[in-house]
């Protein structure tokens, strides 16, 4: 077969997927399961060839050693992929039940009491205020808000007294967040005895109907916990640095919008640490919030299942929070998650312990640890492997490009098509890969140290609400990516200019390593750009409102349209002749959810009028409106074409 024809199976598969899958719902289980079987078949075909035809021989010990390491990482990733495909075999949508819950809650006079816990360590008042005001605004007849301060701040005690919420601290920080929650669990039982506990991280704000839509799930006595997804009202590092906040979703959308509903079909949806409500009796039955690992949420999931309970996942936007703004905070958060997953392997209720977990549950929980061990390490190794070939004469793949393409491309395209389709575009090569590569060299050593040496970093809270007024370069990430980029580029140029002809090792196809190197150069170039962090000048997020409002001044009033709004101001759409009349005027803005707001016109050019609010007495109502209302400040749906175009434009000036 001519070399170019080896690409045809993969190209045909990709073309068919692009044409057919967008017309079919991802919840069409017949097509979904058919795609899963196709991916499994093509993956088995690839790995059979990979194991039997590409492993270096023993007479090349370095080739074989590094080749087996890379194959081992591939097989570990294949296990994660297989478990993901198994998870996709089922799907549960609990939104109809939530609709019934909310309707019934308005007809019942005996809705059970709920204690709302907001654990905090060192967050600023600006961050905490949103969460506390949002919790106070919950539309529910019987609840109490508790602020759990683990840094014992007198000013926060005074603020809580002013707002009218319960402040609670403890003499030490034993057990970190889990210990803080357990302390509150004991105190609140004496004061309220509420049968349900809602937990919000200090930077998360609930929507008003959170409790009305979730409490009803507990009529099933097996249900111990109801988890909801995490959404964010600020752009993460990738969205911000590449200016993609309007076209690309945060990287956690795949987990929360696609994987968790599938896990729920197996009754193994995870507790995710915030934006959940739990049955107090179930938490007490498993000994409280676990302190054995630094990720109390996933271990709580294990313990509840072991005790015979189940969790439910409600895939609705019922809260919003702060995403990590910087690369360092992102890496810190991911390292903590990875280490916690590794620690869970050694506890009694883990996948290897003597407990009541079923085999499929053990495998699903084992996959979480395997994911953190394999993916960061694979990303790091895949950047280094071509350099071993070019500079060390070590060929970890003894295969021709044509044969590799013939076996790998169909499996890769089929798997990619399935994941893109099932996730409705929330996961896609390049963009999704960047978030994995950016932290690979830090997360991989951390998780392997936790596995091999039980070496664990102390619990560190992820910093949120950070501001920067200038461009900042993450020099460790930038230097690492730049070094790999230079060495890779020099090798590719050297090959094409015949400078390295006499130094290439036997057994590896240099053309294969050229393609591999070029892919790495693309990733590394984008990492270099991502490491240059744009300033975050805005202290407040601006929410898209798109509502009609009333504007009054000097005895006149008009109805106009508000495009967006922040805590300190708003932008109105208005005809130019009307806008000119309002220049520098004091006005009154009437909008839903707030008393009339005094404002000052700061700019009235073109078709827009910009307002600055001069109403400190309305501050709380404005915060409540924006953060508990149905408004967005970042994209909720991905636009792959627009996002990729934005990345290319920012990286290479290509439009």
Image (tube, grey):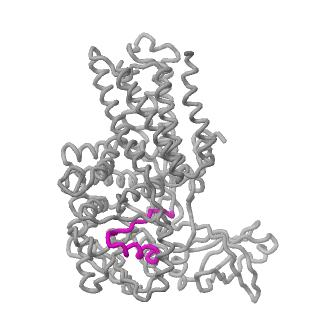
Vertical position of residue 375 compared to residue 165: above or below: above
Vertical position of residue 654 compared to residue 541: above or below: above
What residue lies at 54% left-to-right and 64% top-to-bottom? 538
Q: Which quadrant of the figure has residue 581?
A: bottom right
Question: Is residue 445 something one can see in this rendering?
Answer: yes
Nearest the eye: 477 or 48: 48
Q: Residue furthest right?
A: 577
Question: Is residue 430 something one can see in this rendering?
Answer: no
What residue lies at 38% left-to-right and 82% top-to-bottom? 159
Q: Residue furthest top?
A: 502
Q: Assign the C terminus to one quadrant of the image.
A: top right
What residue lies at 30% left-to-right and 17% top-to-bottom? 57
Residue 633 placement (x, y as % from top left): 56, 64
Residue 488 placement (x, y as % from top left): 45, 27
Q: In the figure, is residue 593 to the left or right of 576? A: left
Q: Which quadrant of the figure has residue 645?
A: top right
Q: In the figure, is residue 623 to the left or right of 355? A: right
Q: In the figure, is residue 548 to the left or right of 652? A: right
Nearest the eye: 346 or 152: 346
Q: Is residue 213 found inside the magenta-colored segment of the image?
A: yes
Residue 313 placement (x, y as % from top left): 41, 64
Nearest the eye: 417 or 560: 417
Q: Is residue 248 found inside the magenta-colored segment of the image?
A: no
What residue lies at 50% left-to-right and 47% top-to-bottom? 32
Vertical position of residue 161 compared to residue 395: above or below: below
Residue 45 placement (x, y as % from top left): 43, 29
How many numbered marks does the figure carry?
0
Q: Assign the N terminus to one quadrant of the image.
A: top right
Residues shaded magenta: 210-233
């Amino acid at each position: 077969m001519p070399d170019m024809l080896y690409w045809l199976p993969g190209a045909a598969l990709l073309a068919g997927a692009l044409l057919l899958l967008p017309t079919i719902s991802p919840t069409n289980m017949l097509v979904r399961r058919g795609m899963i079987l196709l991916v499994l078949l093509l993956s088995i075909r690839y790995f059979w060839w990979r194991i039997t035809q590409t492993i270096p021989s023993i007479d090349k010990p370095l080739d074989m050693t590094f080749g087996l390491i890379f194959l081992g990482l591939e097989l570990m990733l294949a296990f994660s992929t297989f478990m993901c495909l198994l998870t996709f075999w089922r799907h549960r949508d609990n939104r109809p039940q939530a609709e019934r819950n909310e309707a019934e809650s308005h007809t019942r006079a005996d809705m059970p009491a709920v204690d709302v816990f907001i654990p905090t360590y060192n967050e600023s008042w600006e961050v905490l205020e949103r969460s506390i005001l949002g919790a106070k605004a919950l539309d529910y007849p019987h609840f109490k808000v508790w602020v759990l301060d683990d840094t014992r701040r007198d000013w926060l005690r005074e603020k809580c007294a002013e707002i009218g919420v319960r402040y609670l601290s403890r003499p030490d920080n034993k057990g970190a967040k889990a210990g803080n929650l357990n302390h509150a669990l004991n105190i609140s039982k004496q004061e309220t005895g509420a049968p349900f506990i809602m937990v919000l991280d200090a930077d998360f704000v609930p929507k008003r109907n959170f409790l009305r839509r979730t409490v009803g799930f507990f009529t099933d006595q097996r249900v111990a916990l109801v988890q909801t997804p995490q959404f964010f009202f600020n752009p993460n590092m990738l969205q911000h640095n590449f200016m993609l906040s309007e076209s690309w979703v945060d990287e956690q959308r795949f987990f929360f919008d696609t994987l968790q509903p599938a896990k729920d079909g197996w009754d193994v949806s995870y507790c995710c640490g915030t934006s959940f409500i739990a049955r107090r009796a179930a938490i007490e039955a498993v000994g409280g919030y676990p302190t054995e690992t630094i990720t109390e949420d996933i271990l709580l999931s294990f313990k509840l299942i072991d005790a015979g309970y189940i969790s439910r996942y409600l895939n609705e936007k019922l809260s919003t929070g702060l995403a990590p703004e910087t690369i360092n905070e992102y890496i810190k958060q991911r390292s903590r998650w990875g280490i916690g997953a590794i620690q869970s392997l050694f506890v009694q209720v883990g996948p290897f312990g003597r407990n009541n977990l079923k085999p499929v549950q053990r495998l699903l929980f084992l996959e979480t640890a395997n994911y953190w061990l394999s993916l960061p390490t694979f990303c790091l190794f895949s950047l280094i492997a071509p350099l071993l070939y070019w500079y060390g004469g070590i060929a970890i793949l003894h295969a021709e490009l044509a044969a590799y393409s013939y076996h790998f491309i169909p499996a890769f395209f089929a798997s990619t098509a399935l994941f893109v389709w099932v996730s409705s575009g929330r996961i896609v090569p390049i963009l999704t890969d960047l978030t994995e590569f950016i932290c690979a060299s830090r997360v991989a050593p951390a998780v392997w140290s936790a596995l091999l040496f039980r070496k664990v970093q102390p619990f560190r809270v992820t910093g949120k609400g950070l501001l920067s007024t200038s461009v900042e370069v993450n020099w460790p990430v930038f230097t690492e990516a730049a070094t790999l980029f230079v060495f890779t580029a020099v090798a590719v140029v050297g090959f094409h200019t015949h400078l390295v002809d006499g130094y290439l090792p036997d057994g590896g196809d240099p053309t294969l390593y050229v393609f591999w190197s070029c892919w790495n150069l693309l990733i590394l170039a984008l990492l270099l750009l991502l490491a240059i962090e744009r300033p975050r000048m805005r202290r407040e997020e601006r929410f898209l409102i798109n509502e009609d409002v009333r504007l009054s001044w000097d005895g006149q009033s008009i109805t106009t349209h508000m495009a967006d709004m922040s805590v300190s101001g708003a932008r109105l759409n208005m005809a130019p002749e009307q806008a000119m009349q309002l220049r520098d005027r004091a006005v009154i803005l009437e909008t839903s959810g707030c008393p009339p707001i005094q404002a000052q016109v700061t700019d009235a050019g073109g078709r827009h009028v910009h307002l600055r609010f001069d109403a400190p007495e309305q501050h709380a109502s404005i915060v409540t409106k924006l953060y508990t209302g149905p408004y967005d400040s970042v994209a909720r749906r991905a636009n792959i074409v627009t996002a990729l175009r934005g990345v290319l434009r920012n990286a290479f000036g290509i439009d």
